[in-house]
Structure formats: structure tokens, C-alpha cells
Image (cartoon, rainbow, N blue to C red):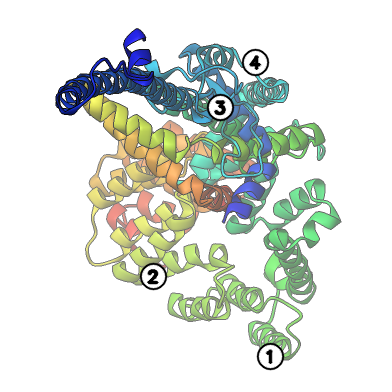
Amino acid sequence: MNGLYIFTRFITCPGAWVRGFFEHLVCKISSIPVEDNRILTRDEMASHIEHELAPTPRKAFALCFVPAFFNGLFAFILAMCSVTGLFYYEQSAPVDIIVNAVSYWFAFSVFVNSYPSVEDALNMKDMVYKYGTVLQKIVYAPAFVLLYLGAFLEKYCITFVIAVAGFAALLMI
Amino acid sequence: MDELEKKEGLPETENTGAEDVSEADTEKKEQSAEELIEELEGIKDMFQRELDKAAEEDSVGEMLIQELEDFQEEAELFETEFDESDLCQCCGEQRRDVSLGDDYPYCNDCRNLMKATPFRFVGVVFLILTMLVSGLALGRAMNNAVEYEAILDADSAYSSGYVVDAIYSYQAYLSTKSADDVSMKVVKNVSKAFAELGYYSNASAYIDQFFSQAQLKMPWNKKYADIKSEYEILDKTTALINTEFSAALNNGEFDYEEDIAKADKLIAENKESGEYSESFLEYAKFLLMMVDGQPNKTQLEQLKKVEAADSEGKYKWLYTNYLVKAYAREGDEENAKAYYEKALDFNRQEMAAYRNFADVYRFSKNVSAEKILEIAEAAQKVCSQSSYPEYHRIFAVGYALKGDYESALNSMASYLQTCQATVSDYNFYAVCALAGEDKETYKEAKETLKSYGYEFGSVVNQFKKGKITMEEILTDKEGEI
């Protein structure tokens, strides 16, 4: 499973790097020490940077949410443009085909690498439920479910499978 | 010391004899006791000294032992406080910053350094690259937004059954495009739409213009290759029909029995060879019957054969409307409605279907002007600028049956202005003008028809003479209108 996970991270390297960048950015803003800033490592930390656990609910949430949000945003924009161009309108101009194909790969990559690590997701839950206010607990609950589920699925490469299935389904349009 | 010397030296003797012996013995005894006492005193002192000395030596040992114990304790304490596990896991030199927790692994300096860990260059590059690709893709999409919107509208119309509208939109888009820069989706949709309506030549022309031979060979483009080959079969079949029945179909000069026999022979031969379209050959036979003016029932039977020959449903456009018309003339509302709905299934803007179905309510027992007007309204709703507004004629029939001749005349006038009119349409127009007592319009219609080389049918003269009523004209299924 680990080998498959690493393999999927390498073939979706643009998304892995973008995700790692945003994770690092949040660490910098939140003053969370980064132990290892390598992103494409050949272990289960591939596409994640090694950092200390976030010490507050807000920081823990930001660490999970911000990279997921930006990767999701990029995935949405790229997928919309590339899928409509490639599969819906089926543009025949060579430039359009190249731009759309690259966008499609980037969209796939950033989508597959959207979610946080399971540790970060669990830390977010711990922080919020230990130290968070009632409002934070309510607001963060759906985000936690989504992020934890995504992290869990990503750990077992299921987001990759979902992405393959989803993007292949777009061919049927 | 002097006493000891005395004890150790020779005794001093002054007396001799018995007295002297006893005195001497007594003195000697007294002297020995004193010496013994002295000796004991000396021993006591010596022991005391030794004891003191020994006591003194014991306290030093204790001190040394204590010192040793203290040293060991300090050593142990040192070992505990400066264990390797207490050192920073990063630099290995300074002690861990336990203020952040007992297990915190780094020293404060390393922690601060970690906070300032720089971004990876590749990460920044990929972020910029992702942003660039997103921007480029978004920019190109925005650039094509107007085109996309038009295509989306056309697709929406197509999927909603507004096929005529969709085709016009697709054609408008394709008229400005070349094969190198076109949405193949539009090409595919327009080809499909034309094929569904039976315009195979148009569909095939678009396929030839925008598909390369290599593309057509791809399995996912099989549908379009099939449309092209279907067109070739239809073209061949049409050529055959034109050759065999040209005189009959174009000029009406034929021997019905002979031509029908010829058609039957062609159909039988084709069943073996499969070279031509069977439905189309059956349809040719139906056309012969129609031109010859065979009874509606005979035509209906033949249409059913056309339908039966179309097992894949590819030629619905060929016979569905005729079936609506034939069932309507038979007054069979149920079947007419079923085929009317089938016709609208693939094209909601199929005006002929509305027109043919409306006939049910004048040829059946349940004559209903209201129902005819309802159908006309339905047709008007879906009819776009790009379709022939045949609903005007349906309105005219409804109004005429209702007795509103002025509205009927106006509707027919609109119909004649916008649609391809036949002699039958002019007959009806004239009847409406007569019924509405509009002699001028009647004359104009007569002159217009004359200019085309035609004359009014007998039904107009009969109506003019009052031999027949409007209702009789409109409900006569074998009539001229």
C-alpha cells in the first residue's frame, strides 16, 4: 500500500508540491516548526511536510483546511476549464488540446493531493474538542468529518481511485 | 619517669634479721602495690591515648565515607541531568526545551531555526506553474465564453427536443469555423440531429468537412461513420427509386399494378442482397399508393410495413408523421396520439405532427374545434423563428370549424405569407374568404393561384354555390382540404 501511495504521489507531483507549499505556508504563518521541508519523500509522508503538531484549534484547523481549500480551488478551476474544453466542447485546435491536457493533469494532481495527513486531521479534532469553544466545535465538525474522511481515503490511495473514476466518467459526457 | 627508674633499679636495704625481713617484706609489698598502681595507671593512660587515637581515626573515616557518598550522589545526579536523551534531537548539543513539555525534542535555538525553515524551491515553482496553467486555462475558457454559451444554449435546446432551433444554432457556429479550430461536440450534435430528422446528406456533409478519415476509424466515432455509411445506402436506394419510378412519382404517369409489382420484386431481391434500405423501398411503394390515390386504409397498411422494416428505429422520421396522418384520417385518436407523441419525442418542433394530429378532431366522430385550437397553441409555443409557422393553418381550421371566419381568414393569410402553400391551402383560403364574405381576398387568391398556373378545386365552387357547408368540407377525410 505504501508503495502504491508513493507511486501515486510521484505521478501527481504538481499537486503534491502545491499541497506541501501551502502546508509549509501555514506552518510559517502559525509559527509551527517545520522539521523536514522535503515533500516528495519515499515514505508515507510523501506530499506532506514534517512539522510539529499545531498547538491551538485555529492553527490545527488552518493546517488542515488551507491546503485542502487551495488545492480544491485549483482543482475546480482547472477541471472546469480542461474538462469542458477536452470532453464537452471537444476543441480541435492543437493549442487548446495541449493547454487542456496539461490543465487536466494538474487538476487531477491537485485534487488527489487535497487532503491533510491523518495525524493532522486527528490533531485538529483533539485541539478543537479539548480547547475549542462550543462555536468552534460546531463550525469545525463538518470540516473535520470531510477532512478526516479525505485524509483516510488519501492514505489508502482511494482519492486517487475516485479521481480516476470521476475524471474517466467525464469522458462519457 | 623517675618513678619508673626507681622501680626498675636495685632496692635500697638498711636492716638485716627477722625484723628486718618482715619490715623488708612489708615495705616490699607496699612498694609493689604502688608500682602496680602506677603501672596500671600508665596502662590506663596508654589505653586512653590509644582509645582517643582510635576515636580520632574513626571520625576521619566517617568523613571520608560521607565524602565518598556525597561524590557518588553528585555523580549520579550529573549522570541523570546530562543524559543524551536530554539533549536536543536536532543539534545534539544543547538541552531540550522542556518548558514546552517533558517530551519536547528540540532546544529553543533549533525550534526557532525550524520556524524559519525556507520554502522548497520546487514547491514555489510548482505553485507558480499551477497558477499559470490555471490562469491560462481560465483565460482561454473566458475567451471562448461567448461561443460556449451559444453552444450550451443549442445543446440545451437539442436535449429538450427543440431540434430545429438547435440545428440553426449549430449551423451558425459552424459557418465561422474550420476543421482545425472547431468544437467537435457541435459537429457531432449537428450530424446526429440532421440524421434524426432524415437529412442524411447534411449530416454526411458535416462529417466529411470536420472529421478526418483517421478520426472516423476510431471506435468512439463509430456512430458518425455509421451515419455516413447510412447516407450512402440511402443515396443508393433513392437513386434506384428515382430510376425505377421516376415517371410515376414525378409526373404521375404509371401503371399502378405494374409499378407495385416492380416495387415488390425490388423488396424481395433486396431481402437477399441487403444492398438497399428495406424501409426506403417499402416507403417508395407507399408513395406509389399515395400518388395513385389508394384508400387511406391501404396506405396505412403499407406504412405499417415501412415501420416493420425499420427494426432499429433509424427511419422514424420517414413514416411517423404519415402514420399520424393516416390514423387521423381513420379517426383513430388513440393510435394517432401514440405516433404524434413518438414524433414529438425526437423533435418537439415537428409542425407536421401537430398539423396531422389536429386532423383527428375533424375526421373522427368527436369533432372538436377547441381541441384543434389547443393543438395549434401547443404548436405555436414550440415553433421558433427558424421553423415554418404551420400552426397558422391549424388555427384557421379550428376557427373555421368554430364559425369564426374572420380569424380563420387572418390565420390562413399569415400561413400563406410564411409557409410553402399548396393548391389545397388556396382552396381553403378562398372558402374562408367566401365564408367571411371577403370578396376581394377571394379574388386575390384566385388571381395568385392563376399566376402559378392553377385553379380552385371543385370544393370552392360548391361552397360558393351553397351546396356544401364549411363543416362538411373540413370533416370530409377524402376531401380537397
Closer to the N terminus: mark 1 or mark 2? Answer: 1
Closer to the N terminus: mark 1 or mark 3? Answer: 3
Residue found farthest to the right: B213
Numbered disc 4: secondary structure: loop
Type of the residue with mark 2: Tyr
- Please give the label number shown on residue B89: 3
Whole-percent x and y of residue A47? 59, 36
Closer to the N terminus: mark 1 or mark 4? Answer: 4
Q: Which residue is mark 2?
A: B327
Query: Which chain is home to disc 1?
Result: B
Q: Which residue is mark 1?
A: B268
Numbered disc 2: secondary structure: helix
Q: Nearer the viewer, residue B263 or B53?
A: B53
- Of the residues tagged 4 and 3, which is closer to the observer? 3
Q: Is residue B442 visible?
A: no
Q: Which residue is mark 4?
A: B118
Q: Nearer the viewer, residue B330 or A137?
A: A137
The vertical placement of A23 against B159, above or below, is above
Q: Is residue A145 visible?
A: yes
Whole-percent x and y of residue B326? 43, 69
CA–CA distance between discs 1 and 2? 28 Å
Q: Residue at x 31, y 27 (%)?
A: A127
Are the residues under marks 1 and 3 on the same chain?
yes
Numbered disc 3: secondary structure: loop
Q: Nearer the viewer, residue B312 or B197?
A: B312
Query: Which chain is home to disc 4?
Result: B
Q: Are marks 4 and 3 in contact (CB under 8 Å)?
A: no
Closer to the N terminus: mark 3 or mark 2? Answer: 3
CA–CA distance between discs 3 and 2? 92 Å
Type of the residue with mark 4: Pro
User: 10 Å neighbourhood of mark 1: few (<14), some, or many (≥20)?
Assistant: few
